[in-house]
Amino acid sequence: MILPLLKGLALTLRRFLNPKTCATELYPEERPKLSTRFRGLPELQIGKDGREKCVACGLCAKVCPSQCISIEGAEDETHRRYPKTYELDAFRCIFCGFCEEACPVRAIILRDTFELATYEKKDVFDKEKLLDLTRKRNLPR
Ligand code: SF4
Ligand code: SF4
């Protein structure tokens, strides 16, 4: 009966003397190491031409179980389809990844954005905000 108690005290003492072995994450000072399978906020991807990859097919909105994506498609002068508006309500997103799976051109990917706290409930992620997340990453296209 006393042995588990001593083991616990020894562990506490070890961690106290060497805090680096402590498993506590120092967030927000240090960003946590996320799993490679982590699914954060869906982000719109940018193609080699610097424009959004999305072709406004609407599959992501159709498959979304939370119905939090709304798209208005349009065509440019070269008859290329693009999303005139693309909105994602992050308050309703359940980070399931169905939109990423359904997208035929890999235009939407769930990466590691998880810091979504905001003071304004009306802060819906529009097309530019979703593209900005990708722009900031500066990924090869
Ligand atoms: S991750 Fe799931 S809930 Fe969120 S936008 Fe995509 S399909 Fe909808
Ligand atoms: S499925 Fe992909 S290409 Fe189609 S509307 Fe959604 S993000 Fe755009």
Image (cartoon, rainbow, N blue to C red):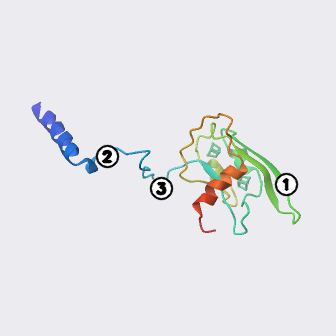
Crowdedness near tag 3: few (<14), some (14–19) or many (≥20) residues, C-alpha within 10 Å: few
Name the residue at the right extreme: 77
* SS under mark 2: loop
N-terminal of the pair, mark 2 or mark 3, is 2
- Please give the name of the residue rendered at 49% of the width and 53% of the height, measured from the top-left corner: 37
Q: Residue at x 71, y 47 (%)?
A: 126
Q: Would residue 55 be found to the left or right of residue 137 on screen?
A: right
When the figure is inspected, residue 79 is found, relative to residue 15, above or below; the finding is below
Q: Where is mark 1, residue-wise? A: 74
Place residue 95 in its image quadrant: top right
Viewer-proximal residue among 77 and 35: 77
Image quarter of residue 79:
bottom right
x, y percent for residue 19: 26, 47
Eye-nearest disc, 1 or 2: 2
Going 43% across and 49% down the picture, which residue do you hit?
Answer: 32
Q: Residue at x 68, y 58 (%)?
A: 107
Which quadrant of the structure image shows residue 25?
top left
Q: Classify residue 110 as left or right of residue 5.
A: right
For badge 3, the amino acid type reads Thr
- Residue 85 at x, y = what percent? 78, 49
Query: In whole angstroms, how far apart are the C-alphas of marks 1 and 3?
Result: 35 Å
Q: Please say if the residues under marks 1 and 2 sit with CB atoms less than 8 Å apart.
A: no
Q: What element carries label 1?
A: strand
In primary-sequence order, the first of circles 1 and 3 is 3
Q: Name the residue under label 2.
A: 23
Type of the residue with mark 1: Ala
Compared to residue 71, the image places residue 120 above or below, namely above
Q: Check disc 3 and report the residue beneath it.
A: 36
